[in-house]
């Protein structure tokens, strides 16, 4: 019987995981190629033979998604697997139509074929969109579990943008580990806050190997999701974060809507800054899809070292990159802080953008007058630094989860914006986790 010739469409995350859990070593299928999008500089490489397994002694090539049609025809592809996140449902179907028109089947893979079972309890934190507030929710959950007497490790959704073999299993217990693994800004934004709280972080490429190592040193595994993807592990308790600043997106983006069906509890975040009717709309959608899940409302209060220093200043606002780009947010905590604390002007950074930062604005024209903290590699980090230092402003307000001055030199005063999850009313996450995991 001929093997089913397959292409996996991805963005260096879910695509590799689907391959590792289902296709690697599967004699019924031949994965001819990956195609890549969203992430700079991943195409043109190979998924290495060390990770691909015995069926792929030469590794598997990674092509730009723009070459998908020609690859289907050139290799007589039988099926294409769609395996990346935070895209509108309509876009998924446009991709499906493209694949079907080229002659191949179109496939989405679910939990039965891709989730791994742990021998330790798993709490998953996922979301309906990028930028909903997974990170502060995950930090809140980790603190609760630690206070209950458990040792916890956060396993983060993959961001493997470097040497994939070296990144097979990564363990972070200190800031030195961030330098050791040559982390990008995007990785640091996710890992540093956990390290600040004394939580070990695992990440990498092979999430079965990552899980088995983490299980050896913790009581509970905390899945820290990426974008709006669903968990790589079978959760014992599933928390899904929704964003009332983007009402309706919870039921119109893939695979965020999948998370609605899988949730044990919803956290509607940012209710302190959202319109009440939008909070209500989100709540109604969540309850309609999954009426059994508990709904918690929460705020993300802002903390700034010296709010008075912002007053009257012309400021450059920096926000988390993925939230502004494929997350499609027009502003974030930095913009709110600038307005709240009396900045004279939020200066548009686009006239000062250089290199890859200018290219990011061109690719995501919907991004407003905010600077996305893009840093997928040294060249992009250098472009970010140049853009900041060129900007004609009095001050920089940085709402990324990390201290940017650790990796770039900024020639202007900077105020950092921090934010943590704060539940409003009852039940709280502590109530739900205590009920589930009380010793």
Image: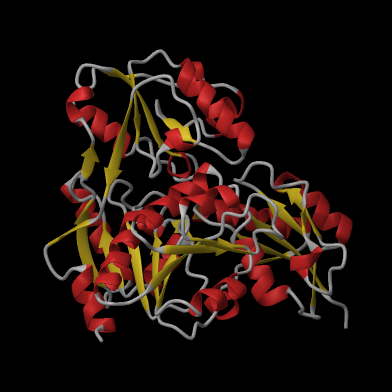
The quarter of the rendered structure image containing the C terminus is bottom left
Which residue sits at x=59%, y=33%? 380
The relative height of residue 208 versus residue 183 in the rendered view (above or below) is: below
Q: Position of residue 204 (x, y in %)?
A: 59, 61
Q: Position of residue 426 (x, y in %)?
A: 13, 68
Q: Position of residue 149 (x, y in %)?
A: 28, 77
The quarter of the rendered structure image containing the N terminus is bottom right
- Residue 110 visible, this angle: yes
The relative height of residue 393 versus residue 186 in the rendered view (above or below) is: above
- Residue 115 visible, this angle: no
Work out which residue is located at the far left of the displayed protein and give it. 425
Front residue of 50/279: it is 50
Work out which residue is located at the far top of the displayed protein and give it. 392
Front residue of 351/157: it is 157
Q: Position of residue 23 (x, y in %)?
A: 72, 74
Which residue sits at x=24%, y=62%? 284
């Amino acid at each position: 019987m001929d093997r089913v010739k397959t292409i996996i469409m991805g963005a260096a995350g879910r695509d590799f995981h689907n391959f590792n859990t289902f296709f690697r070593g599967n004699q019924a299928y031949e994965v001819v190629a990956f195609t890549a999008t969203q992430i700079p500089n991943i195409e043109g490489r190979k998924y290495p033979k060390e990770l691909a397994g015995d069926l792929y002694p030469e590794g598997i090539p990674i092509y730009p998604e723009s070459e998908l049609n020609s690859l289907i025809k050139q290799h007589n592809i039988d099926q294409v697997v769609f395996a990346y996140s935070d895209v509108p449902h309509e876009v998924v179907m446009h991709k499906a139509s493209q694949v079907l028109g080229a002659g191949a089947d179109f496939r989405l893979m679910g939990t039965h074929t891709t989730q791994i079972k742990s021998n330790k309890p798993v709490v998953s934190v996922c979301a309906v969109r990028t930028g909903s507030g997974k990170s502060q929710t995950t930090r809140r959950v980790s603190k609760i579990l630690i206070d209950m007497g458990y040792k916890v490790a956060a396993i983060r959704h993959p961001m493997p943008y470097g040497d994939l073999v070296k990144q097979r299993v990564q363990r972070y217990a200190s800031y030195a580990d961030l330098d050791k693994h040559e982390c990008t800004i995007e990785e640091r934004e996710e890992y540093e806050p956990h390290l600040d709280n004394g939580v070990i972080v695992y990440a990498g490429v092979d999430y079965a190997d990552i899980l088995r190592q983490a299980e050896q040193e913790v009581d509970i595994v905390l899945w820290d999701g990426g974008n709006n993807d669903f968990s790589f592990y079978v959760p014992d308790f599933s928390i899904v974060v929704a964003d009332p600043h983007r009402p309706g997106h919870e039921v119109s983006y893939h695979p965020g809507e999948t998370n609605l069906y899988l949730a044990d509890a919803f956290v509607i975040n940012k209710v302190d800054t959202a319109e009440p009717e939008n909070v209500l709309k989100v709540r109604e959608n969540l309850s309609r899809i999954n009426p059994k899940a508990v709904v918690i409302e929460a705020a993300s209060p802002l903390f700034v070292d010296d709010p008075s220093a912002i007053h009257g200043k012309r400021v450059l606002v920096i926000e988390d990159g993925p939230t502004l780009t494929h997350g499609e947010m027009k502003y974030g905590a930095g913009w709110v802080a600038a307005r709240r604390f009396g900045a004279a002007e939020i200066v548009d950074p686009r006239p000062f953008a250089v290199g890859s930062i200018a290219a990011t604005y061109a690719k995501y024209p919907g991004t407003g007058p905010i600077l996305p903290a893009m840093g997928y590699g040294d060249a992009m980090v250098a472009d970010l630094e140049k853009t900041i230092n060129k900007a004609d402003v009095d001050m920089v307000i940085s709402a990324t989860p990390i201290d940017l001055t650790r990796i770039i030199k900024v020639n202007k005063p900077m105020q950092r914006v921090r934010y943590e999850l704060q539940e409003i009313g009852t039940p709280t996450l502590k109530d739900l986790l205590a009920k589930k995991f009380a010793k």
